[in-house]
Amino acid sequence: MAQSPPAAHSMLGRIPDAFPQGTARVTDSRLREDICRFARSLFERGLTPGSSGNISVRTDDGGWLVTPTNASLGFLDPARLSRLDAQGRLLDGDKPTKEIPLHAALYDSRSSAKAIVHLHSTHAVAVTMLPEIDPASALPPMTPYFLMKCGSTAMLPYYRPGDPAVADAIRGLAGKHSSVLLANHGPVVAGESLEAAVFATEELEETAKLYLLLRGLNPRYLSPAQVQDLIKTFGLTDIHPASLQ
Ligand SMILES: [Zn+2]
């Protein structure tokens, strides 16, 4: 194992403990394989092109495993994933994605988050450029699964990729959204497991696709009463008033 590089590599603020003592532990090699498997699946289905997109997962020691910078999600090497300690210092592997501030801010503001997926998926990006999008609820309540997996999706204004200012914008959401669209860029979704974050990101992309398919056709979305029923039945916590109009 490589020595920790100097503090200049520290990119994160405080990271809460990933797994309290006594909870199930996932082996490092299993986690690495899972990241690469999900990443490849996303890439092969055209959900993030070229070397775009990145994934991070919290590890048992409070650090993270992160996909490297300029790496295609379709061709990741489990042994070369970036391993960071709890302070965000690179312990081993390739240099991490430059979108670390984005991930760090979301972990900081949502203590339940164990994994984050960020893609440049076409339909979700397209939606961010439309004039009518509500930043508090970027997509209407179209399907139950969207609300159950993604809650109300926030939209943030445009930031240059890797701009540390995006971290402040994410923190400004105060952990109230597990799914966020970055304008002209792509979705960022947190989950309580890697699988949950991946599935929610897919749900967000499909919902964006539905929105574009139906735009201008006066579609019937779920009614406020139907949304309230989902909130009550499934104990949903991330649905905001803007999704109930
Ligand atoms: Zn990006």
Image (cartoon, helix red, strand yellow):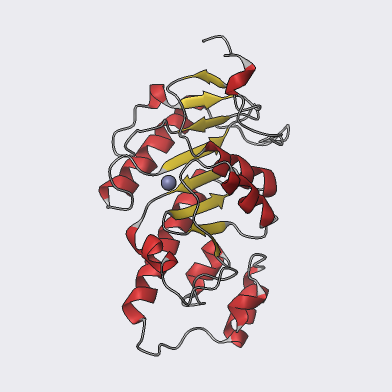
Above or below residue 219? Residue 3 is above
Residue pictured at 46% horizontal, 55% vertical: 187
Task: Kindly tell me whether residue 5 is visible in this rendering.
Answer: yes
- Residue 76 percent location from the top left of the image: 34, 31
Task: Kindly tell me whether residue 111 is visible in this rendering.
Answer: no
- The answer to which image quadrant residue 39 occupies is top left
Residue pictured at 67% horizontal, 65% vertical: 237
- Residue 233 percent location from the top left of the image: 64, 74
Residue pictured at 54% horizontal, 69% vertical: 147
Q: Which of 70 and 143 is in front in this view?
A: 70
| Image quadrant in which the C terminus is located | bottom right
Relative placement, left or right, of 216 versus 192 is left
Q: Nearer the viewer, residue 88 or 80?
A: 88
Relative placement, left or right, of 153 versus 73 is right
- Residue 41 percent location from the top left of the image: 32, 46
Above or below residue 105? Residue 148 is below
Residue pictured at 60% horizontal, 69% vertical: 136
